[in-house]
Image: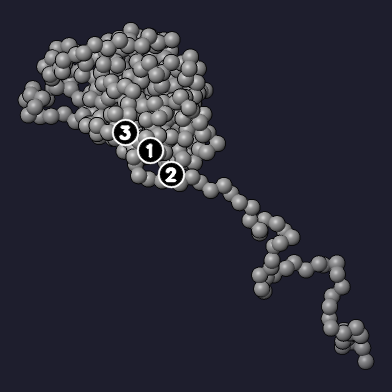
Amino acid sequence: QYDHCQYDQRQPYHHQQQKERHPSLLHAFNNDNNDPISSPQSSSTQFAMNPTSEDAITIMNDTFQLTQQQQTQLQSLCLLIDEWNDRINLISRKDCNVNVIFGRHVLPCLGVLGLSVFDSNKVKRVVDVGTGGGFPGLPLAIAYPDVDFLLVDSVGKKLTAVENVAERLGLTNVKVHHGRAEELVEESGKFDLCVGRSVAALPKYCLWIQNLLSSDGKLAYMIGGDIEEEILEETESDVDIDELLQYPGASDKRILVFPKQGVTELAKASGLVLKLPNKPSKSKTNNPKRRQKAKGQWTKRDSTAPKQRGYDDFQRYDSTQA
């Protein structure tokens, strides 16, 4: 079990405060001019963190009480994603390295562990729609080995990599689905939680996943930037990820949690109509009795039947006879 984080109201941290508080983020503000404003870093490198650093261990060990095996799996996850990213563009290749993968991708996903919505006693099945390179599904599957995860994406080659990574990490609680969320008709109403990370506009995303949630299911959505007030009105919680991690300055994203009703309302607000896949109908051509031959179609001849020569008294001419 993981202790849910208790939050307090923190004042915004300036760059210099973050630099003094968190040594593992020092490189995010170092440049030739030693001036973070005149030479801005990319958002990826700004949040990079060594997965074996003291701060990383503190978050994994003290904040979320992850076991040594789980911490090792998360560190190995970064290496495997980096390996696959050389072949397949799982995540942005700009400034991509193990530290960026952990600080920008793995660590923010762990923020979900701090939400009261993720109670492993109640949450048994989780769907990650638009998983891409396996985020947030893979880090969460490492943290909750007793919860079943279904990772969904429409890009098959990415799921090939995700499936390989899960296998090499020994994650038996992870399955993948190549396709769209709305195609999972047989999984309707079977998930306690849906997680997503900046996949699409929230109303459209809610339209895709609304049928997957159980009656008391919820959506935990990782997102950055400004959010429309109409969307925030449907949330039951809105927490900055660095608060969930108890590590100010670790992320510029937040996690919005929506109840099933809120998901339904946002889906309606999208103004779109969900097109469910048609059930396959029985084609008439599948019935051999009703199958009609096309004109001029070739048919195999019965070799045992007598040849039809057109006359019965046929005799072959023999030139040797007089």
Q: Are marks 2 and 1 in contact (CB under 8 Å)?
A: yes
Q: Are marks 3 and 1 in contact (CB under 8 Å)?
A: no
Q: Nearer the viewer, mark 3 or mark 2?
A: 2
- Relative horizontal placement of residue 322, taking residue 158 as reference (left or right): right
Instruction: Name the residue that disc number 2 marks.
Output: 274
- Relative horizontal placement of residue 203, taking residue 49 as reference (left or right): right
Q: Secondary structure at mark 2?
A: loop
Image quarter in which the N terminus is found = top left
Q: Earlier in the sequence, mark 3 or mark 2?
A: 3
Residue nearer the viewer, 70 or 210: 210
Q: Secondary structure at mark 1?
A: helix
Name the mark on residue 267.
Answer: 1
Question: Residue 285: x and y, percent?
Answer: 66, 59
> What residue lies at 66% left-to-right and 58% top-to-bottom?
284
**Residue 271 visible, this angle:** yes
Question: Against 63, is 240 above or below?
Answer: below
> What residue lies at 39% left-to-right and 19% top-to-bottom?
117
Q: Amino acid at mark 2?
A: Leu
Residue nearer the viewer, 137 or 280: 280
> What residue lies at 69% left-to-right and 66% top-to-bottom?
292
> What residue lies at 29% left-to-right and 23% top-to-bottom?
238
Residue nearer the viewer, 56 or 188: 188
Instruction: Name the residue that disc number 3 marks.
Output: 198
